Structures are given as C-alpha cells and as structure tokens.
Image: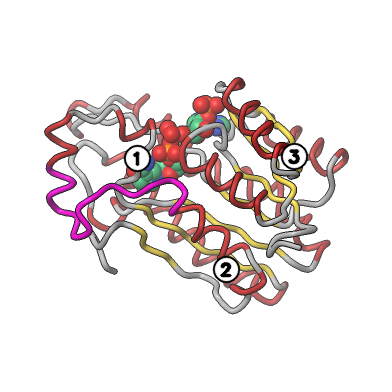
Amino acid sequence: MGELSEKIALITGASRGIGSSIAYEFAKQGATVIINYKSSEDMAKVLAEKIEKIGGKAYLSKFDVSNPEEVKEKIKEIEKEIGNIHILVNNAGIVRDTLFLRMKEEDWDRVIKTNLYSVFYVTQAVLPMMLKEKWGRIINISSVVAFTGNPGQTNYAAAKAGIIGFSKALALEVAGKNITVNVIAPGYIETDMTAGLPEKIKEAFLQQIPLKRAGLPEEVAYLAAFLASEKASYITGCVFHINGGLYRG
Ligand code: NDP
C-alpha cells in the first residue's frame, strides 16, 4: 500500500518534463493517474506503459487546458469512466518569451490562457468531485519568477503570480471541506522548457544557484507527492520553493 493508494490523480501537461515525473511518482505511490497532454501523444503513451510496467494504473486524456469546452467535456468523461478525481496538479504551462515592448498581444494572451485561465477551467471542473469525496488535494505549479521577475517574461511572471493569489483565496474557500490547495514554485529545472535557453543564460542561472546545479523534474515530483498525501493534511494556502537556494522566500 503506497501513500497515494486508492486515489485518482489528474496531472495536466504530464506528457513531458515535470508533469511526467509527477505522474510517475504518484503511480509509484499507488495512485491511479490520468495523464493529460495536448500534442505529445507518443510520450504520454510511453509514460503510461512505464507506469503499467511497475504495476500502476494510468489513463491518457488529451485536451487543451486553455479550451474551457474541451476541459469540461473531458473531465466529465473522466468522472464517468474512471471515477472522482481526488488529486489535481495544475502543471501544464508554456513560455513565449520576449521583451515587453516587443510583446504581441498574442504572446500575452497565449501564456495567460494556458498558464492561468487553465487553472480556473480545470479546477472548476474538478472541484465538485472533491466536494463529493469530502477530500481533495490541489497542487498548482507556479515559478520562482513570480517572486523574482525575469526579463522577457512579463506574460509568464504575471500568470505564475496570478496562480499564487488564486491558490491562497481558494484554499480559504475550501479549507472547511477537507480540501487543501498549495503551490509549488520551482526554480531552474532540467526539462524541454529550459533546454532551449541559450548557453549564456543557462550559465548565468547556474552561477546564481547556491546548490550550483539545475533541479531535476523528479525532485519536484517528490514534493508534489508529499503535498498530495495524507501526511500533508495540515498544510494549505502555502507556497513551496524548490530552486537550489536561488530564492528563499
Ligand atoms: P515542458 O515544456 O517540459 O512540458 C510542458 C507540458 O505541458 C507538456 O506535457 C505539454 O504537453 C503540456 N502543455 C502545454 N500546453 C498545454 C495545453 N494547452 N494543454 C495541455 N497540456 C499542455 O515544461 P516543464 O515540465 O518544464 O514545466 C511544467 C510546469 O512547471 C509549467 O507550468 C512550467 O511553467 C513550470 N515551471 C517549469 C520550470 C522549469 O525550469 N522547467 C521552472 C518553474 C516552473 P504537450 O507536449 O502534449 O503539448
């Protein structure tokens, strides 16, 4: 029996990177996981096979988290076919970096829609199931840049800061219902999102990190698994920094 056995967990953007590691860790700890993705179907399938190999249960659910109609439809499907979701990780995210004066409304819109509106859409569709279960864990993935800022990321920093205010308010609304809402704010983690950064920028980041290395997606996953577990029952409305000491709150 794992810490998360008998729980059903939906992880958005789980085909790659941090979301994929969270799904795998949750499955290792006994949860049935729903792997959401938008386009990386092959990677989502490989992850599901990896989970099945260790005796876990995984389902794929393809939907665009920034499309409210798709979100509603697919979450209804999950409820009908798999059951009530107990754990939600709002992880899906994108960047469209550019200096503010050059930023097109489309860059602003895409990032806010995918990183912030998605949290509204998915959480609103899932919350009634947690209320029925009288138990729930919502974990939202923000970023260190919500605290520090980062040139070229006004859109992304705004979305990631928005997630924090959202989570603190929702935590108060649902605390009486045995549902916790927490935020993880990662620093520089090795995934596709950071692989594309120019070497110079990567070097500059590493220089500033007291632990002198980038983080690994599984290190974020261990924290998420703890927050999703019964052991974290008395923690809500909090932000957890995981960044090698780059920012300490
Ligand atoms: P990746 O780029 O490696 O993966 C992003 C994931 O999000 C993919 O699975 C992708 O699915 C999914 N996704 C993107 N858009 C959508 C959409 N519209 N609908 C559904 N799924 C979508 O990112 P990371 O793993 O690095 O990042 C995960 C989260 O962590 C993000 O919220 C990011 O902002 C945050 N973060 C990352 C940091 C880092 O250093 N890596 C630092 C701080 C925060 P698909 O490929 O199928 O489209």
Instruction: From the image, tell me which residue sits under label 3.
Output: 75
Gap between marks 3 and 2, in whole Å? 21 Å
Q: Nearer the viewer, residue 182 or 156?
A: 182
Query: Vertically, is 189 above or below 224?
Result: above
Query: Vertically, is 53 above or below 105?
Result: below
Q: Secondary structure at mark 3?
A: helix
What residue sits 27% from the left and 31% below the top? 97
Q: Nearer the viewer, residue 107 or 130?
A: 130
Q: Earlier in the sequence, mark 1 or mark 3?
A: 3
Image quadrant in which the C terminus is located: bottom left
**Span shown in magenta:** 204-219
Q: Is residue 215 magenta?
A: yes
Q: Earlier in the sequence, mark 3 or mark 2?
A: 3
What residue sits 51% from the left and 39% below the top? 92
Q: Assess mark 1: CB under 8 A from ligand 1? A: yes
Q: Position of residue 160 (x, y in %)?
A: 39, 49
User: Viewed as shown, does residue 218 lie left or right of 151?
Assistant: right
Q: Position of residue 75 (x, y in %)?
A: 74, 39
